[in-house]
Image (cartoon, rainbow, N blue to C red):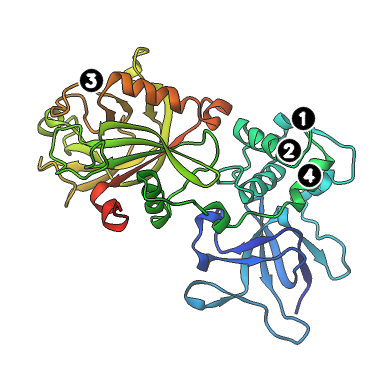
Amino acid sequence: MSNYILKVTAATPLKLKAEPAINLPDTFKYQLEAGTQLPVASCGKYQEIHYRVAFGQDEQGNQVAFPGPEGTLRNTWLIFVGHCQLLNADGTPVRFPQDQGVLKLETFVGKSDKLLMNAITAEKLLSAQIQERLISLALLDPPADGKFGPISIAALKNFQARVGLEQQDFLDGPTAEKLLRAKPVSNSQVNNFQISNSLASRVIQYMQRKNYKIFHGNQRYNIVYIEGMDLDSTLNNDKPNAFNDLRLVIEIVNGVPKLVGKWEATTEPGKKYTLKPMSVRGAARIKFGQYKAWQMGFHRRDKRHPALVQAGKIPVHRDLNKDYSRAGDLVEIGLFGVNQHHGYSASRNDVGGHSAGCLVGRSIEEHNQFIKLIKRDQRYLANRAYMFETTIIPGDELVKHFPPG
């Protein structure tokens, strides 16, 4: 039995979790095209910006369902409110009590109404709907969290410019209409790189392989550390207590990965804090991976030492046995003051007390170049509290999967 009709107004996925589709495995989502109509047996609101729908039977009496994990057919899914309509059997919209007075992009189409951009954030559904569209167009990084701040505003203005609309400080009918009609960019289009054998290209391919986030566009930088690699891009023996790692900044413009910064660094604690750690559990050694955890600030609150300061939780290995290795070590997650700072231009072969587990560029001058570059990032310029993502990878694994030519 079908009591309702789901009408898809913009290409969108069904989802098994209320998370951005880009973060879900393929088996947890099923893509629907705009114009699709499906029978619904029951429905309700879920976390404000999703409907939970249980599909009913089609006109031939067959249960409507879609493949989920392990190919199992599922008839109950989540769908983003901003990309669909739920209709009663007579074609009238389904009304939920919490929908009264709620704004959507469709509210503005064909009308002269305008909403100041800095007022969009008060409308959670509208905010998330716009963010979903901008994310689908590769103009905004996920998630669509309904918090429409400076970065979302900058992305919306970027969209207006891209489609030939005069940039305004408000959302209006033409902007809403073009957002709704814009064709989403596929993952293959977003990640269609012009790959060479350069270090930047190899790193980006590695990040793709690990399903890490990759940022595209002018002044949208990818911060990467490679452990155990020299400035000439060759592997070293990664001996302890040395600045024998790389700090990289990669920019991707028109699909071409390019190194815009490359400096000596260390991703590991030096001898002093390995032997006499600041924690009884052992010195911290960051776990390989990608983390959104750093904001612009000052190392140890010293105004003479600008740095990317840890502001989000990350995992670290605890080197309790003091063997300068991650193998077998306890992993702890938290805020540990793992900053990205400089090493006071110390000797390349002696980190000493300049790192207790931070991501440290050896040279003061080169670190200042790094900070100056990162401060030009468009997302930081839009929001001085922007949280930067950083990727830490093992050099030997990079070379194993993507060797130099």
Three-letter code, disc 2: Gln
N-terminal of the pair, mark 3 or mark 4, is 4
Give how far across and how far down residue 155 sits, in percent.
64, 37
Give how far across and how far down residue 136 sits, in percent.
63, 51
Query: Which structural element holds mark 4?
Result: helix
N-terminal of the pair, mark 2 or mark 4, is 2
Query: Which structural element holds mark 2?
Result: helix
State how far apart marks 3 and 1 are (Cα): 47 Å
Quarter location, residue 261: top left
Residue under label 2, please give it. 160
Three-letter code, disc 3: Ser
State how far apart marks 2 and 3 are (Cα): 46 Å
Residue under label 3, please give it. 345
Residue under label 4, please give it. 176
* Mark in the foreground, 3 or 4: 3
Give how far across and how far down residue 138 sits, in percent.
60, 47
Whether residues under marks 2 and 3 lie with C-beta atoms below 8 angstroms apart, the answer is no
Q: Name the residue located 24 percent from the left edge and 23 percent from the top edge.
A: 343
N-terminal of the pair, mark 1 or mark 4, is 1
Three-letter code, disc 1: Gln
Give how far across and how far down residue 334 sits, in percent.
33, 38
